[in-house]
Amino acid sequence: MTTYVGSRVPRVDSVDKVTGHAIYGVDVALPGMLHGAVVRSPYPHARIVAIDTSAAEKAPGVKAVVTGKDFPHLFGAAIKDQPFLAIDRVRYVGDPVVAVAATSEREAQYARDLVRVEYEQLPAITDMRLALADDAPLVHPDMHTYERGGHEIIPHTNCNTLYRYQRGDVEAAFAEADLVVEGEYSAHAVSHVALEVHVAVAQYDQFSGDYTLWVTTDRPFFLRDDLAGGLGVDGSKVRLKVAQVGGSFGAKGVPIAEAIAAVLARNTDGRPVKVELTREECLIASQLRVPAIMKLKTGVNKDGFMIARSADVLWDSGAYTAYTVGVAIRGSQTIVGPYRIPNLRILSRQVYTNKAITGSYRGYGTTQVTWACESQMDEIARELGIDPVEFRLQNGYEEGDSYLNGQIMHGVGLRETIETARDEIGWGSVDRAPAPHLRRGKGIATMIKPTMTPSSSNVVINLGEDARVQVVCAAPEIGSGQDTVLAQMAADAVGVPLDDVSVPATDTALTPYNGPVASSRTTYHMGNAIVSAGNEIKGKILELAGKTFGVDPDYLEMRDGEIFDGEGELLVTLKNLLARYHGEGLSLTAGGRYTSAQSQLLKANPGEEWISSIFWMLCTQAAEIEVDTETGVIRVIKVAASADVGKAINPLTCEQQIEGGVVMGLSNGILEDFKISNGRIENGTLADYKVATIQDMPEIVPILVESVHNEAPFGAKGIGEPAAAATPPAIANALFDAVGIRITDLPITPEKVLAALSEKKEAEPGD
Amino acid sequence: MTIHLESTINGRSVGINVDPTLTLLEVLRENLFLIGTKEGCGVGECGTCVVLLDGTPVTSCLVLAGDADGRDVETVEGLAPDGELNEVQQAFVKSGAFQCGFCTPAMVLSATALLRRNSSPNEEEMKQALGGILCRCGAYPKILEAIIAATGEGA
């Protein structure tokens, strides 16, 4: 029985946020704080011939000027390929070259403009398709010498990731198939546009050699290690204190402002340095979603069963790899979709280009591959003359099916997500033409996403003599409501009122190690750690109550701060029990840990265990749209978004994630469009890079499916990422339903719609 | 060189000497420490810096501080002066009309201003009033739900 889990309680950060009291990274200010500014490359690819900082150093208020040669260390998640400031060579427009710190932001900017950098331009590679050509200029001629993990690269080329997967005999199955459908799909670079810009304050202690940073991040320990790598120090020398995070969506995990702030702080006399990027810097020189070109071929038999699929995926990491190697590997696996397909072949390659860095973005590759997979699913269904919903149900994973590596899947509510989305949108009926120039249609798309596996979470739960509970963990609230969800789980696990639970801010010197707040993993992993520690605390309290009142603790239960006996009668309140021991200063602490590493659920084909996932996210969306055939403008009328959350710890925060995901998916899919010319982003402003407003919002109906996962805390899985992935293909499939045109390259802009309509008209003159 | 401002800020008279090149946003955040007002772009494109100037929502990053002289400025800090959340704030809490919260002060102020001048706006008017403020978390459905609730219609 739970008191808070499953309940729609208001978020614990409510009052702080509606009153403006929450302190974000941009709000951090320290005594004597300096401000930083960055000189960035104006060229996509160039050799740095000379840097003259003499004028900047003499400018008013300047306290530090730093160049790449001061920090000749490389960092990176899978390949250590990136310096904090460019060394000898710049690789994209916006690559940081020189950093300046001064007593005010304006002085720093003034001094920055006095820095003179002489460049010799080099041939730039800005098209990922050309990056693998024999004569392509190399973005990283020394790639083969870089320190890296175990994944494959193609040395002396631009290919920084090579991944292959094969099962069965794909060619034989294609030959046997009654229908083979082939297509090429592309997903574009989009920006996270977290409304809080990249920002950090750093301070360096000359005596201990320790760096302390006040940051806004979703992955404190990973960021700490990347910072230590770039600074050339041990991870123990870097401490991160995490403020409220004004949105991340995957953006705030790599050193961006943090790197600049740290190198500047190292060169002051101990004064802290704040670096706050401009919005334009965030758009052109932070991180974008990895663009992908996906060739997809699927064979089906005439009964509508998929028998083979091959995929050739090309990913564009931009100038440095950051978190993209994982995207290119895990993302490519997901192009199979949530479907049983016996014969598979996947080739995934990722290339460097002289463009802005790309990286993790809500969905970690899933938004890109779902676009290809679900567009093609629709094409196949229509060619076969099968209803697209039925086609998905017929091929979709069910509980107990095996994943592509042989893992037996558990907690699979796919069917229910498809059926509920279908019913909510009113599948099968549509008012086709509400006006002569308007056409309506409905479309459906589904998706699957694994979570980072294996991974671990640790928590320390303290119960003080004041009967208050602290949930000490390194899981920063990035907006997803997880402080609330973690507090709810802790309140039930320990058995105390929610109001008596706090989740202190992350500080890598105080909070135990945790994997990132990414991959929709926190509720599940940290939740399991919390349940373990919470139960231990509760056990100790019941033991104490038993001893105090001379009863067997096994017959006692604690809920909401009250201890009940075997008859369900109130024995004592927790506060009163602890008060009896006041003089002794009784406090209880328990550590909780969860790792998926040893789970029986991960059992898979030998050598392929790493492809397993401890849980699977499944989400289906059905969309109704209206297209104006004169302007090409799409209006999304309604989206029914159904997600298998395992168990909704808090239905309110689950709905928030789903609704927010749909808004982001819609925005990515039909509005956001970078204009990139020779590697240079030409529209690096929010006036020209259009992001969805409340006026673009359709009716959104979030639907929560609860498949219940046996190893999960209270049955709960993750929900942060899946909601954004299915929206663009659902819209594209609805567009096809409305007017019979298929857009395969994102975004679905009015220009592309008009061009496709006119092409269709020419092809069918009698229509 | 500085200029002298005499403004009413959150109901209190404030006299302050400031650099005339500063924006209202900079003065609010850096001189008056009213950091509930956020900067998301600094060039009037994201709407997170909205404050009420004589009751009208403005992007404070585009208003020179001098233009606030003799006028009434209201920030999010002024909405709950005695610790009691206003109706819009209460509705935002109940509906969960925020996620990361960075745009929330601007959303709450704009919604409050709307309801002061029109106690029963329709949905289109609500969307229009908030159309200049970006929320990347996509809290829009619940923001709309909260404003409807705050009008009493949702009760």
Image: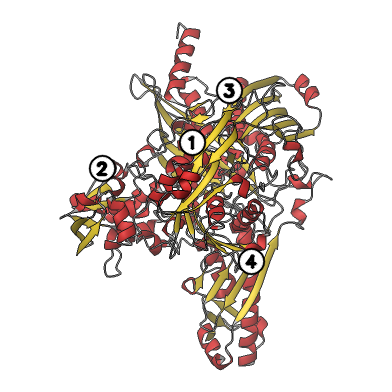
Give coordinates of residue A284: x percent, y percent. Answer: 49, 37
Q: Provide the secondary structure element on which disc 1 rests.
A: helix
Q: Chain of mark 1?
A: A
Is A197 rendered above or below residue A404? Answer: below
- Image point 65% across, 65% down: which residue? A458
- A390 and A726: which one is in front? A726
Q: Amino acid at mark 3?
A: Arg
Give coordinates of residue A586: x percent, y percent. Answer: 59, 86
Q: Amino acid at mark 2?
A: Glu
* Residue bearing mark 3: A382
* Residue bearing mark 2: B125
Q: Chain of mark 4?
A: A
Q: Are marks 1 and 2 on the same chain?
A: no
Density class for disc 4 (Cα within 10 Å; few <14, some 14-19, many ≥20) is many
Q: How many marks?
A: 4
Q: Provide the secondary structure element on which disc 2 rests.
A: helix
Whether residue A659 is visible to the viewer of this picture, yes or no, is no
Q: Are marks 2 and 4 on the same chain?
A: no
Using residue A254 as the reference point, say whether residue A55 is left or right of it: left
Is A153 rendered above or below residue A535? Answer: above
Using residue B15 as the reference point, say whether residue A385 is left or right of it: right
- Mark closest to the chain's N terminus, 4 or 1: 4
Q: CA distance from mark 4 to mark 1?
A: 36 Å
- A481 and A287: which one is in front? A287
Kindly identify which numbered label has been placed on residue A668: 1
